[in-house]
Amino acid sequence: MSTKLKCLLLDDELPGLTYLKMLCEQIPELEVIKAFNNPETFLAECNDHDFDLLISDIEMPGINGLQVANLLEGKAIIFTTAYKDFAVEAYDLDAIDYVVKPIKKERLQQAIQKALKRFENNKVVRKHLQLNTDKGKTILSIDQIFFIKSAETDSRDKVIYLQDLTNFVAKNYSFDKLLKQLPAEEFCRINKKEALAIKNIQFYSHDEITANIMMPNGKPYNFGLSESYRPEFVEKVKL
């Protein structure tokens, strides 16, 4: 993870959302990726964005913030609300903090510091993964992974290709869930369907990556680099 927390914002009231975005942009530790004023739109698009933290209102029409949190896979959440009644439910969801409106910058900064502390405490140097696969449970050395792609038959599954080009299917893993278990500085999402081990990058251009591993026909693997994932990719390869 970078030194900044990448965050998405969600509030159905536009004045409140605009004010929240303004406050967040004044906090150096935050990078606002996108702001949403509709929970259904957020749920439809959130997997297209690389983010660490969601700052969300609770009372919203249709789907409230607590329900949104239940549908996310382990993402850090700070709730904002004009009502104190939801505090217990919010903490039951392991929310980082619960900020009562009207939001003050100093109070929001306190919540962000809690988020940073949690991310720091959760940093673990992993060398192996334990995954449910089409061949049963497996323990995999992270160093063996070449790239990961969505399965053609079911996008909820991910095909993991190893350095020797053997592969297996990780069952029912989103990219978020899988990449969260891998060292962030060693792997990067490069398009909607693929993620790649950075050590296997030989060359890259504006929209294409050439790997240092050859296909059976003797030509190097090539991958598409999409616009939405390019900034994170460029940042990581420069480290």
Image (cartoon, rainbow, N blue to C red):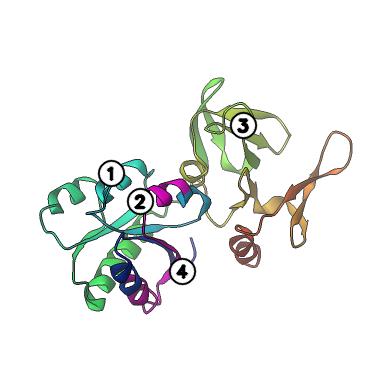
Per the image, the residue denoted by label 4 is 3
Q: Residue at x 51, y 28 (%)?
A: 171
Residue 23 magenta: yes
Per the image, the residue denoted by label 2 is 39
197 left or right, relative to 87: right
Which one is nearer the viewer's eye here, 229 or 124? 229
Which mark is first along the chain, 1 or 3?
1
- How far apart are labels 2 and 3 at the CA level? 28 Å
Residues packed near mark 4 inside 10 Å, few (<14), some (14 to 19) or many (20 plus): few
Let me know if residue 125 appears in the view. Answer: no
Which mark is first along the chain, 2 or 1?
2
Residue bounds of the magenta highlight: 20-44
Residue at the top extreme, as displayed = 135
Residue 163: assigned label? none
Quadrant location of residue 105? bottom left
Per the image, the residue denoted by label 1 is 67
- Provide residue 180's location: percent of width, then percent of height: 47, 47
Which mark is first along the chain, 1 or 4?
4
Amino acid at the residue labelled 4:
Thr
Residues packed near mark 3 inside 10 Å, few (<14), some (14 to 19) or many (20 plus): some
Let me know if residue 194 appears in the view. Answer: yes
Per the image, the residue denoted by label 3 is 151
Which mark is first along the chain, 2 or 4?
4
- Provide residue 214's location: percent of width, then percent of height: 82, 41
Q: Nearer the viewer, mark 4 or mark 1?
A: 1
Quadrant location of residue 147? top right
Which one is nearer the viewer's eye here, 206 or 40? 40
Residue 192 magenta: no
